[in-house]
Amino acid sequence: MNRSLKIKFCRYALFWKLAAGTFFADQVSKLLVVATLPPMSPGLPGFDPSDCVPVTVIPDFFNLVYVGNFGAAWGILHGQKIFLTLFALIALGAIFFFRKHLEIERRPVQIAFGLLVGGIVGNVIDRLWHGFVIDFLDFRIPIIDYRWPAFNIADCGIVCGVGLFLILNTLPLFGYNHPEAKRFNEQDNLK
């Protein structure tokens, strides 16, 4: 491997590992869902209303299902596959273009963006391959009798990545310009 390429890869190694890990976990879990669960959404191949029974993991709280999301979070922008795919690709391009400004060389930021990018790529692959995103984690909040919209591991990566990035930018201890954060990153670069 070219020395400068190796140095650049090492600088962003945690980012690449988390992005690949999130993507791999997402895609493998979706393959297992498609192979083992009956589709529960009209429009999915093999959909049979009489076969729509979720797999109960924790009664009245957590089920495994196989549903197709033809939109974004909570089904918004239903049927806008091209727009959602282009938006995701533009977001990936912006992350790459602004990587220095976003300080992705910092390890905590690599964690956030590794999760985010792995999730984005996982859902983009679904949209391109299937025409919809495969969701399978189904939670019900019994206290308020609310069923949370089904989601997947890519969605978890996106939410956790964005949440961590917001925390890194708002909590004083981990904020970009806080002396403790700079000391933390300097020690981290020595490893």
Image: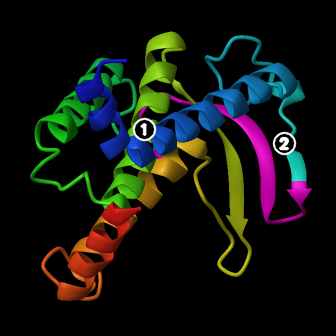
Quadrant in the picture for residue 33: top right
Circle 2 sits in a helix, a strand or a loop, which is it? Answer: loop
Q: Residue at x 33, y 29 (%)?
A: 6
Q: Decide: is 15 above or below 32.
A: below
Q: Earlier in the sequence, mark 1 or mark 2?
A: 1
Residue toward you, 119 or 128: 119
- Of the numbered discs in the image, which one, if any, rests on residue 16? 1
The CA distance from mark 1 to mark 2 is 34 Å
* 71 within the magenta span: yes
> Tag 1: residue type?
Trp
Residue indicated by mark 2:
54
Q: How many marks?
A: 2
* 136 within the magenta span: no
Q: Which residue is drawn at 29% across and 70% down?
A: 185
Q: Residue at x 82, y 25 (%)?
A: 38
Q: Can the viewer see residue 119 in this picture?
A: yes
Circle 1 sits in a helix, a strand or a loop, which is it? Answer: helix
Residue 22 in the figure: left or right of residue 138: left
User: Where's residue 130, x and y in %?
Assistant: 54, 14
User: Where's residue 114, x and y in %?
Assistant: 41, 46
Q: Nearer the viewer, mark 1 or mark 2?
A: 1
Image quarter where the C terminus lies is bottom left
User: Which stretch did the figure color magenta?
Assistant: 57-74
Q: Can the viewer see residue 72 in this picture?
A: no
